């Protein structure tokens, strides 16, 4: 279908795809300045493409070898700090203080 979007170099990930494919889809379905969310961020190909397309990005990944992680655009760090505070205030019984 899209011959130009072949190949990928993604550090032995089970579902690799090229940055060019992500760029094409991001440009088709979002506008400059939007935030792109990738629920299966893997090697962060979508985050790279989002940055190149002028979008912010958020990615989440559950890698059972390394544990869950969230990859966020550095420009979004203040937003996530506020969000975490709000969630903790409204759900104090779900969080522990100190190291886990």
Image: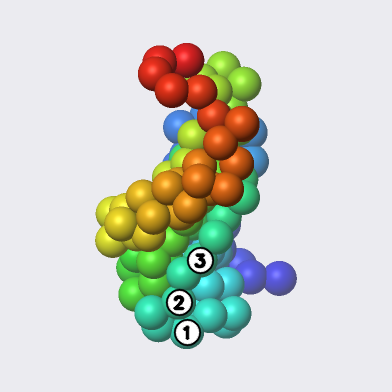
User: Residue at the location (36% across, 50% down)?
Assistant: 81
**SS under mark 1:** loop
What residue is pinned by disc 2? Answer: 34
**Which sits in the foreground, 10 or 59?**
59
User: Residue at the location (51% across, 66% down)?
Assistant: 36
* Residue 99, position as x, y percentages in the image: 40, 16
Is residue 75 among the parts visible in the rendering? yes
* Residue 61, position as x, y percentages in the image: 57, 38
Q: Are marks 1 and 2 in contact (CB under 8 Å)?
A: yes
Image quadrant occupied by the N terminus: bottom right
**Image position of 18 (left or right of 55):** right
* Residue 87, position as x, y percentages in the image: 53, 48
Q: Which mark is residue 31?
A: 1
Q: CA distance from mark 3 to mark 1?
A: 10 Å
Q: CA distance from mark 2 to mark 3?
A: 7 Å
User: Residue at the location (39% across, 18% down)?
Assistant: 98
**Which sits in the foreground, 77 or 30?**
77
**Which sits in the foreground, 1 or 71?**
71
Is residue 72 among the parts visible in the rendering? no
* Residue 3, position as x, y percentages in the image: 61, 67
Q: CA distance from mark 1 to mark 2?
A: 6 Å
In this rendering, is residue 67 above or below 39? above
**Image position of 79 (left or right of 13):** left
What residue is pinned by disc 3? Answer: 36
Q: Residues within 10 Å of mark 1 (few under 14, many from 20)?
A: few
**Which sits in the foreground, 31 or 91?**
91
Q: Are marks 2 and 3 in contact (CB under 8 Å)?
A: yes
**SS under mark 3:** strand
């Amino acid at each position: 279908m899209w011959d130009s979007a072949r190949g990928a170099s993604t550090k032995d990930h089970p579902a690799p795809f090229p940055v060019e494919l992500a760029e094409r889809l991001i440009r088709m379905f979002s506008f400059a300045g939007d935030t792109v969310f990738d629920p299966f961020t893997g090697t962060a190909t979508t985050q790279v493409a989002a940055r190149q397309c002028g979008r912010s990005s958020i990615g989440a990944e559950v890698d059972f070898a390394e544990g869950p992680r969230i990859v966020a655009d550095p420009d979004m760090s203040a937003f996530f700090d506020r969000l975490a505070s709000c969630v903790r205030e409204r759900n104090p019984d779900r969080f522990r203080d100190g190291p886990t």
